[in-house]
Image (spheres, helix red, strand yellow):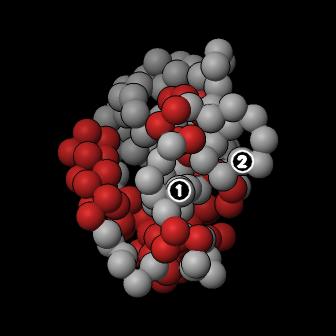
């Protein structure tokens, strides 16, 4: 089974561990909150990650911001809901309500290919390792 860690969850609620840039072999992104390694341009110049209001929060997650959910977060949430059937605002609300450890357990189950055990990507519709489609009943993701 997959095992995500707290540093893989971006302040906006994206699980970097499921990003195709994080999962690819070449020019791999190290994740939004990783202390070392390369980051893709989108992550390095991200308005949310570099937000001054976010820097003032205790948790360093957007749900702790008095502006939550701000316009920037609402825009990226809409894009992820439409393109990838994932709500970042919902992810953040779950983290706020249940805590990061419980959220990580759910993410481990949700993003593990039930056929081969590999990590599924939020950006793709099939497993990178075995090629099975996500809508296959063998997968956690619908």
Q: What residue is drawn where x is 65% and y is 15%? A: 26
Which numbered marker is on residue 34? 2
- The answer to whether marks 1 and 2 mark residues whose Cβ atoms lie closer than 8 Å is no
**Label 1 element class:** loop
Q: What residue is drawn where x is 63% and y is 81%? A: 58
Which numbered marker is on residue 49? 1
Marks 1 and 2, the one that precedes in the sequence: 2
Q: Would residue 99 be visible to someone looking at this image?
A: no
State the residue in front, 142 or 9.
9
Which of the 4 image quadrants contains residue 67? Answer: bottom left
Q: What residue is drawn where x is 43% and y is 64%? A: 91
Quadrant holding the N terminus: top right
Which residue of the protein is positioned furthest toward the front in this rendering? 52
Quadrant holding the C terminus: top left
Q: Give residue 38's position: percent from left, percent from top.
A: 69, 31
Q: Which mark is in front, 1 or 2?
A: 1
Q: Give residue 17's position: percent from left, percent from top.
A: 60, 43
Which of the 4 image quadrants contains residue 40? Answer: top right
Q: Is residue 40 above or below residue 31?
A: above
**Label 2 element class:** loop
Q: Is residue 139 above or below residue 63?
A: above
Q: What residue is drawn where x is 25% and y is 39%? A: 83
| In-image side of 131 versus 7 (left or right) | left
């Amino acid at each position: 089974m997959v095992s995500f860690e707290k540093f893989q969850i971006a302040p906006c609620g994206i699980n970097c561990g499921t990003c195709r840039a994080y999962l690819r072999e070449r020019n791999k992104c190290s994740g939004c909150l990783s202390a070392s390694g390369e980051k893709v341009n989108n992550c390095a110049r991200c308005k949310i990650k570099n937000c001054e209001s976010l820097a003032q929060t205790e948790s360093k997650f957007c749900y702790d911001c008095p502006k939550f959910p701000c316009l920037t977060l609402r825009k990226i949430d809409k894009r992820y809901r439409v393109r990838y059937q994932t709500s970042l605002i919902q992810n953040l609300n779950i983290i706020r309500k249940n805590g990061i450890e419980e959220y990580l357990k759910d993410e481990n189950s949700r993003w593990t290919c039930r056929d081969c055990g590999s990590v599924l990507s939020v950006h793709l519709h099939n497993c990178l390792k075995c090629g099975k489609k996500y809508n296959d009943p063998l997968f956690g993701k619908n």
